[in-house]
Every structure is written in C-alpha cells, then in structure tokens.
Amino acid sequence: MYNRKKIVVVMPAYNAEATLVRTYQEIDRRLVDEVILVDDASRDRTVEVARRLGLRVLVHPRNRGYGGNQKTCYLEALRLGADIVVMVHPDYQYTPLLIPAMATMITSGVYDCVIGSRILGGQARSGGMPTYKYYFNRMLTLAQNVLMGSKLSEFHTGYRAFSREVLERLPLGENSDDFVFDNQMLAQIIASGFRIGEVSCPTRYFAEASSIGFRRSVIYGLGVLETAWRYRLHRWGLRRDRLFDEGGLRLDPCGSDGLGAPLLAENGDRYCPK
C-alpha cells in the first residue's frame, strides 16, 4: 500500500526461469501489495520458480502470446482491487527499482500512465540494444508522434504503470494478442486523453533476456504504423474504429471470445479471474 493505494505488479512470463529470481529480488515488497505472474505455457521451470518465490501464479494451458498474457495480467490485477498496476518483464531487462518512482507519479494524481523510457537517459545503445532496433525505435517513434500528435521519447518500452481507471476504461479486448498490443494500448491511452509521464530507464540486453528477431521486428513495425494510421483516421472522423471506443476490457476470460480455456491457478485448479 502506498499513499493509500494498492500497488500490484504483474509479470507476463514465458521461459523466464533463468531471470525471474533476479527480477523479483529488486521489487520492494514494502511498497508492492501483490505480485502476479502469468505463465504463457513456458517450456522451462518458470512456474516452479515463481511458486517457490510465493508469487500469485496463473498458467495459460496453451500459449496466448504476449498481448494475450497481458490481458490476463490486468484482469487479475483489477479483480484483486489494484489501484496502480505496474508491468515488469521477468526477464530482468528493466529494473524493478523504478517501481516506487513510477507509482508515485500516478498516486500523486499528476499522471495516469507512466512508461520507463530507454531513450531519455541516452543509455539504450550502451545497454546493448542492437543497432537496427535502436534506429527502428527512433524512426517508428517519430512517425507515431507525428501521426498521433504526441511527444513521447519512445513508444516501444515494455515497462509501464497504469492507474486503475486506465485499465477499466480501455477496450483492451480489441487489441492484438501479439507484441503490437503494447503499442495499441499507448495509442488508446492517447486517444482517451489520459496523461502519460516518462522516467529514464536503463535497459539490459543479454543472452537470457527475451527479444524478438529481425523478422518479427519488421512485422511489429508494420503493426505499429497501422495502429498510428488507424488512430489518425479515427481522429479525423473518417473511420470509426473499435480500437479507440472506450468501454473497458470487454473480455470473457473463460469464453470462446475471451481468453479461451480457463487458467490454471496455483493449486492446479481450473480458474477464471472474475
């Protein structure tokens, strides 16, 4: 509990056995009330390690993708009564030491969403970001800022914090289950008029850190540009786009139009986060 707000950290996990302990050790549990790990059908011992750490663990029986994993994360966090939700990747690419700063920026009422920017501090390249990814990041961010009228230093960080209101109002169920989910979510936040703050965040690229290859990066980049144009056409009134219609998650986590098969809870029971 912080400033009388319940802080929940969510971890969308896939094959994070080697890095999960290091990531968790940097979370300040005096500040954070709950840590949720949603495992996306990992092929390693991620679930075993998470349970040994005492995390609240949910398991997708089949792989849902990065975006699908986040949908489960946010549904469960809201179900637990979170006021602030911070997404931390369990691959140790982003340091959880910034959680207090990010949470403070929201609990103070100044921002509704805070992102950890790898660009602000100028450490992206020294942290090991591949050259092609760095320039993709800069070019895509420029295009998005122009099309969406925003001034973010980057759109592509996976380190984010949200107020409860943001998660309750955005139509996240309309978003992709793939990596472009992150980008669609930021576009929705901008479309809804929420305030976005940024903090400088160092990043780490190393063998165990998750990363998509060149081909997937190109697919992601095309999805990013499509999202930006959908936003622009929606704002111009040329196309009514469900991606930007507010109304909440609109997910039935146990139905055929939601997350599919029920999750597996800590004790192995079939479970629906309702």
Image (tube, rainbow, N blue to C red):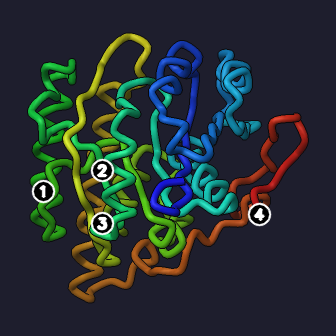
Residue 141 seen from this side: yes
Instruction: Write the residue at 55% across / 19% down.
Output: 21
Q: Residue 272, relative to residue 147: is it above or below?
A: above
- Label for residue 143? 1
Cα–Cα gap, marks 4 and 3: 28 Å
- Label for residue 274? 4
Cα–Cα gap, marks 3 and 1: 24 Å
Q: SS at mark 4?
A: loop
Quarter residue 234 falls in: bottom left
Question: Looking at the picture, which amino acid does disc 3 mark?
Answer: Tyr
Q: Which residue is mark 3?
A: 111
Estimate the x, y position of residue 157 in percent, counting from the top left.
30, 42
Q: Which residue is mark 2?
A: 115
Circle nearer the N terminus (1, 2): 2
Q: Residue 89, relative to residue 263: is it above or below?
A: above
Q: Nearer the viewer, mark 1 or mark 2?
A: 2
Could you tell whether 180 is left or right of 5 in the image?
left
